[in-house]
């Protein structure tokens, strides 16, 4: 059987390095009767929004099958499991706790802790309650305080059950994809909307961190940011400048405020009307000390000078080779990312909170022999190992994803899981990548 290959002397082979898998609430839970509607329920009803016209009504039926899924985690011998809380499953439109939803997560947390699997909880993974979106969503500053209230309720109820909290998963995706270019929920369009949403999400992160410090002082608390390293299309001066703009706008826009309390220089190139609605004290509030930084990485992109007035850069198509979702496979970019962040910022410990690949999996005679995904993991784990050797403090790695699920605007067409899900029967089957992942974990010293 093909194995995940990383250097034999790698720090990642030590038991102190945490390995896990990750999921998110809307992508796997189903059971929409057990929660308030969220922005993705509404977005799925929009004509043309989801590639296969599907929705999250059933997803992986995780709420009904969570005990089986925990048994999968135990079988895989993971150290940790990263999952997200559905805000609309926990808090009603009146601001009160939904006890049934709370009970579901407490049972899950208790089961994980009993098995020695560390719970890494993400408080927001894109599924904003629709009742808040109806009032403006993340463009409305009041949503910041609604998030603060939600975090207070959740952390008081969970007590010491959680090993690690992340306030947000990928603010870039929520703000840029959801409120600026409209390809994700809630499907709004406009730079002014996107920049306002990004600012309010970052502000909510800062306020959420203060609540975590107060209510969950024993948990590791931080944020999860996604990075797409930006490479110049050529060495031309204008292409290098555009690439710097792209990195500032896509990556550093979220990193620099969290780490240094300031937006990157590209903010000066925006029209005054499009700039974020910064109020006195906001940047200090955003810049809270972190116990860890979660980094999600999948691919890289190339940039050259903008071709239209008002644009900051021109983004090129992905190079080959590509995953089934069309993203270039280039593990070196993960090493480049980690070392560049290490050189630029005073970083807390890092967890690779998502890394994985959509592949064109085929079930043949009851097996999925996804050697291409195993190669992807090998290349990227080796890049992480090299970054550790360079001096970057990486404390863990989470494979995305535990199981095939609802892949946002792609619906059920793209499979990222190391566990195959038959969406008709809900049968779970370990792919070759899951077996290789398990073999790596049990072989550590």
Image (tube, rainbow, N blue to C red):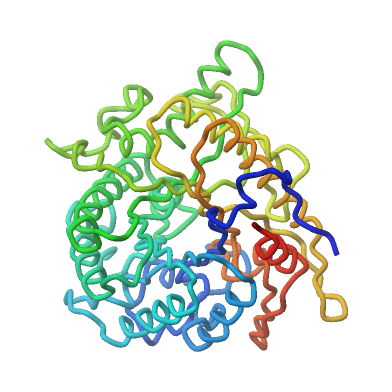
Q: Quadrant of residue 135?
A: bottom left
Where does the image place residue 172, in percent across and percent down from the top left?
43, 46
Residue placed farthest to the left in the image? 280
Residue 331 as seen in the image, left or right of residue 241: right
User: In the picture shown, does residue 242 fall above or below 218?
Assistant: above
Where does the image place residue 221, in percent across and percent down from the top left?
33, 54
In the image, 180 versus 142, the foreground residue is 142
Residue 284 as seen in the image, left or right of residue 310: left
In the image, 421 versus 219, the foreground residue is 219
Q: Give the residue drawn at x 56%, y 21%.
A: 305
User: In the picture shown, does residue 150 fall above or below 145?
Assistant: below
User: In the picture shown, does residue 425 fall above or below 261?
Assistant: below
Residue 441 as seen in the image, left or right of residue 176: right
Q: Give the residue drawn at x 32%, y 60%.
A: 219
Q: Give the residue drawn at x 43%, y 25%.
A: 344
Q: Quadrant of residue 445?
A: bottom right
Where does the image place residue 19, in percent across and percent down from the top left?
57, 59
Q: Give the residue drawn at x 52%, y 62%.
A: 49
In the image, 214 versus 103, the foreground residue is 214
């Amino acid at each position: 059987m093909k194995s995940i290959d990383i250097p034999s002397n790698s720090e990642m082979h030590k038991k102190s390095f945490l390995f896990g898998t990750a999921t998110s609430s809307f992508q796997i839970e189903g059971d929409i009767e057990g929660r308030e509607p969220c922005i993705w329920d509404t977005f799925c009803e929009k004509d043309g929004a989801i590639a296969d016209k599907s929705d999250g009504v059933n997803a992986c039926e995780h709420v009904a099958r969570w005990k089986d899924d925990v048994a999968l985690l135990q079988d895989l011998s993971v150290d940790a499991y990263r999952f997200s809380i559905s805000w609309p499953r926990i808090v009603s439109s009146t601001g009160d706790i939904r006890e049934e939803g709370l009970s579901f997560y407490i049972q899950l947390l208790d089961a994980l802790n009993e098995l020695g699997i560390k719970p890494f909880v993400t408080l927001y993974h894109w599924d904003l309650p629709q009742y808040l979106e109806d009032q403006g969503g993340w463009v409305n500053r009041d949503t910041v305080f609604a998030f603060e209230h939600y975090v207070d309720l959740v952390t008081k109820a969970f007590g010491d059950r959680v090993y690690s909290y992340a306030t947000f998963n990928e603010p870039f995706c929520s703000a840029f994809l959801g409120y600026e270019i409209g390809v994700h929920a809630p499907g709004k369009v406009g730079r002014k909307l996107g920049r306002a949403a990004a600012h309010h999400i970052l502000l909510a992160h800062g306020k959420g961190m203060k609540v975590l410090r107060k209510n969950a002082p024993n948990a590791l608390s931080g944020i999860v940011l996604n990075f797409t390293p930006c490479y110049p299309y050529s060495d031309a001066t204008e292409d290098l400048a555009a690439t710097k703009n792209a990195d500032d706008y896509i990556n550093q826009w979220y990193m620099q405020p969290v780490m240094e309390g300031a937006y990157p220089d590209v903010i000066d190139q925006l029209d005054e009307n499009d700039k974020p609605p910064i109020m006195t004290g906001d940047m200090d509030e955003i810049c809270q000390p972190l116990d860890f930084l979660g980094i999600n990485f999948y691919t890289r992109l190339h940039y050259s000078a903008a071709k239209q007035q008002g644009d900051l850069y021109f983004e090129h198509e992905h190079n080959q080779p590509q995953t089934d979702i069309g993203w270039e496979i280039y593990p070196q970019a993960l090493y480049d990312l980690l070392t560049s962040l290490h050189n630029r910022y005073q970083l807390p410990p890092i967890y690779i909170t998502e890394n994985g690949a959509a592949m064109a999996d085929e079930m043949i005679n009851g097996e999925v022999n996804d050697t291409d995904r195993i190669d992807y993991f090998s290349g990227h784990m080796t890049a992480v190992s090299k970054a550790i050797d360079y001096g970057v403090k990486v404390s863990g790695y989470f494979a995305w994803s535990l199981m095939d699920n609802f892949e946002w605007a792609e619906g059920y067409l793209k499979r990222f899981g190391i566990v195959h899900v038959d969406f008709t029967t809900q049968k779970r089957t370990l792919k070759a990548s899951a077996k290789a992942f398990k073999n790596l974990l049990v072989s550590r010293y």
